[in-house]
Image (cartoon, rainbow, N blue to C red):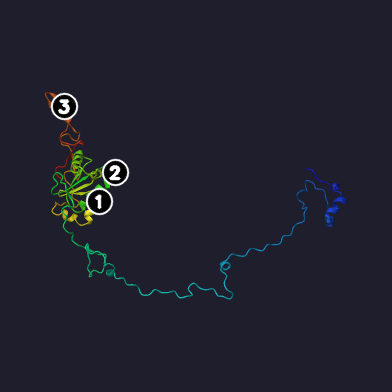
Amino acid sequence: MGCVSSNLLNRDEEFTQLGSSALGHHIVSLTSTTYGLLTLDPPHTTTPSTPPSRFTLASLFPSEPNSEPKSLWSEPRPFRSEPEIINSWELMSGLDTESFRFSKENSNPNLLTPTKPGPTPPNRFERICPPSGENRVVIYTTTLRGVRKTFEACNAVRAAFEALGVAICERDVSMDSGFREELKGLLKGKQREAMVPPRVFVKGLYIGGAEEMLKVAEDGILGELLKGLPKKKVGAVCEGCGDMRFLPCFNCNGSCKSVVKEGGRVFVVKCLHCNENGLILCPVCS
């Protein structure tokens, strides 16, 4: 590494520019051993900077001089007066009391005693009677899960009648095409949506679907319609089919085929005792 000799510096030319302060310095030659170790410029003295003022809440909300800090609970808290008494009978004086009967002896207004429903209007339900449905509840349902809304509606209607303890005649349109054609014949001339299960018939009267049945139950008319119908014990199960409503055909064992011998020849024909799925109705609960 090269170095710079002090002889190259012209004292007459450079000292006049540097001033008298530069004459007090010792001028040496810089070599590889001394380069970087010497400080050519005098150290600069730095004055310590004053730290910024601390950010406090007092800087945002200056208080008055000679003022004491106020407590949050220095002022007395306002207390509520006596509780207001609301008379529920005065609030319900203008309501319609035909559907419910109130008794002032009952201090709880939430316990309402419903009045007895009036007689069922004769023209409210259409007279459509399924086969063998004069004195029973007939429900056309489906057990297919293809449409979840339809499947859940059928389960809800079935569970509602079972909770009431009424024996029902359930006809599954997905297990027997004969029931599907039977429902189409009963509701002939109606919209297609009216043929979607579930469809409820009580004593030869067409109630409707799940929504119509719920409306009848809310109006208190369903109990009047079910009077005199055969009852079913809660939890009772059919001994013949286990409440499945169908059994395999006894003739073809569910194969839908029958063997016929005629003139020394054997023919395989369709079984005439079962439906397209090889099933027959349970003789115990049908």
What residue sits right under mark 2 in the picture? 147
Alpha-carbon span between mark 3 and mark 1? 51 Å
User: Marks 1 and 3: in contact by CB < 8 Å?
Assistant: no
Which dot, 3 or 2, sits closer to the camera? 2
Q: Earlier in the sequence, mark 3 or mark 1?
A: 1
Q: Position of residue 153 (x, y in %)?
A: 26, 48
Q: How many numbered tags mark residues here?
A: 3
Image-based side of 68 in relation to 141, left or right? right
Query: Type of residue at label 1?
Result: Glu
Q: Residue 194 occupies which quadrant of the picture? A: top left
The residue nearer to you, when weighing 48 against 116, is 116
Q: Earlier in the sequence, mark 3 or mark 2?
A: 2
Q: Residues within 10 Å of mark 3 (few under 14, many from 20)?
A: few
User: Marks 1 and 2: in contact by CB < 8 Å?
Assistant: no
Give the structural element (helix, strand or loop) at label 2. Answer: loop
Above-or-below relation of 38 to 98: above
What residue sits right under mark 1 in the picture? 211
Give the structural element (helix, strand or loop) at label 1. Answer: helix
| Residue 267, numbered label | 3
Which dot, 2 or 1, sits closer to the camera? 1
Query: Type of residue at label 3?
Result: Phe
